Amino acid sequence: MAANVSSPMTSNSVTASGILPQVISPAWLQRPSPEVAPDLVGCTLVRQWNSGLQIRGRIVETEAYAPGDPACHAYRRVTARNRVMFEAGGVAYIYLIYGIYHCLNVVSDQAGVGSAVLIRALELDSIPDWIPDTKRRKPHRIAAGPGLLCQALQISRSLNGISLQPPASSDPQDALWLEWSQPSPSLVQTTRIGLTQGVDIPWRWYESEHRSVSRYE
């Protein structure tokens, strides 16, 4: 179940509606990933482009990866690929799988630990113009998977290591950040997907019966 944590407010970000949501602070993310992952379900991921466009996605599914976990990229040692995972929580770790799909992770815990939360699925608040008509027929499935959500929000390794905070400058620029919401009251906890190691570790959480979850157990 989600931990009973206080609101992780830092600064406020302005939305098109004029509402000022609470931005999640790096300090709140600097906890073990199995604590952060369930607390992120129900929160919002914000993608901003240098054009000023913003699209928000409600997080409906996450997975945790941590030290001692053979499925974690940081399991053995620091490498050029995984070094961002060893930074203090509050930055994005983005990697490529199958040479095609990007995956977005929220680095968690303290510097040097090697811990992250994979964002597995989102419910988008709007459909980007570049999404083809064939996918628009099922809008709730556009970001229903780690590779799909990165495709939909144009998230690639060019954003690897970026701070998960709104830009300090008022000028629009490429950015990612997280906005607080109360954790989902209907969480399901189960094992993770698509692994060959650490398959029995129950570090996947998703919102029960939500149509944007990548896969149900």
Image (cartoon, rainbow, N blue to C red):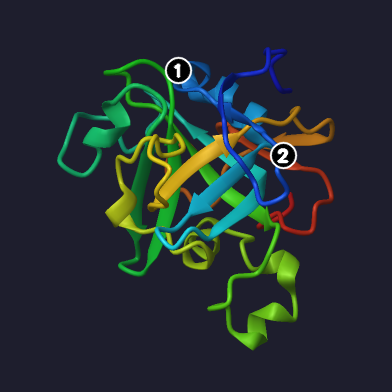
Secondary element at image label 2: loop
Going by the image, does 108 lie left or right of 98? right
**Measuring 44% from the left and 42% from the top, which residue is drawn there?**
105
**Mark number for residue 173?**
none
Residue under label 1: 30
Q: Position of residue 123 (x, y in %)?
A: 70, 55
Q: Position of residue 38 (x, y in %)?
A: 65, 29
Label 2 Cα crowd, 10 Å radius (few <14 / some 14-19 / many 20+): few
**Measuring 75% from the left and 81% from the top, which residue is drawn there?**
137
Q: Quick check: 166 above or below 27? A: below
Whole-angstrom CA distance, mark 2 to mark 1, is 27 Å
Q: Position of residue 34 (x, y in %)?
A: 55, 24
**Measuring 35% from the left and 48% from the top, which residue is drawn there?**
94
In the depicted view, which residue is nearer to us: 140 or 131?
A: 131
- Hey, what amino acid is under mark 1? Gln
Q: Position of residue 170 (x, y in %)?
A: 43, 43
Which quadrant is home to the N terminus?
A: top right
- Hey, what amino acid is under mark 2? Ile
- Eye-nearest disc, 2 or 1: 2
In the depicted view, which residue is nearer to us: 75 or 158?
A: 158
Going by the image, does 173 lie left or right of 84? right
**Measuring 39% from the left and 27% from the top, which residue is drawn there?**
115
In the depicted view, which residue is nearer to us: 71 or 152?
A: 152
Kindly indicate the quadrant of the structure image that contains residue 181: top right
Residue under label 2: 19
